[in-house]
Image: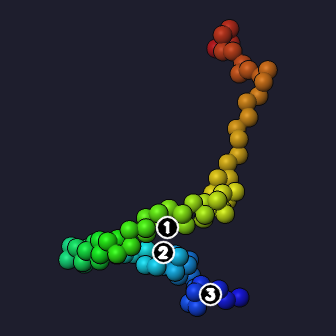
Amino acid sequence: MRAYIGGHQAVSVNDFIELALGTPAELWLGEEGETEQERAARLDAARDILADNPELPDDVARVAAEVIEAHAPELFNVVPLTRSVGRRRPSRKGAAA
C-alpha cells in the first residue's frame, strides 16, 4: 500500500514528518557529527523558515497533539499497580534466630 500526501509519496516515518511539517526533522534536531559551521548554517536556515512562516510552531504542536491522540493507547500503555488489602508482611518480631 502506498501513502501519498499532497502528491508526494511517503515511504518512511521521516517522510511523513517532513511532509507534515514542510521541513525535514533534521533541520530542527540536527544531525550526529555535524560541524559547528554546519550547525550554524542549519540554525540560520531554521530562523529564516520561522521568519517566513511564524505559524510553524503552532502547526508542529498541532501535529504532535494529533499523533499523541491517535496513538495514546500505545504511548500510555500503563498497567495500574494494585495494592492487596488485608495482606500484611509477616512480622519479624519474635522470630527464631
The spot of residue 54 in percent (x, y) is 38, 68
Residue at image location 58% in from the left, 86% down from the top: 6
Front residue of 12/41: it is 41
Q: Report which residue position mark 1 lands on.
A: 59
The answer to whether residue 69 is above or below residue 22 is above
Vertical arrangement, residue 9 with respect to residue 16, above or below: below
Q: Which circle's residue, 3 or 2, is located before the other in the chain?
A: 3
Quickly name the residue at label 3.
Answer: 4
Residue count near mark 2 (Cα–Cα under 10 Å), binned few <14, some 14–19, many ≥20: some
Residue 92: x, y in percent?
66, 15
Q: Earlier in the sequence, mark 1 or mark 3?
A: 3
Q: Which residue is mark 2?
A: 21
> What kind of residue is marked 1?
Asp
**Mark-to-mark CA distance, 3 and 2:** 15 Å
Judged from the image, the secondary structure of the residue bearing numbered disc 2 is helix
State the residue in front, 77 or 7: 7
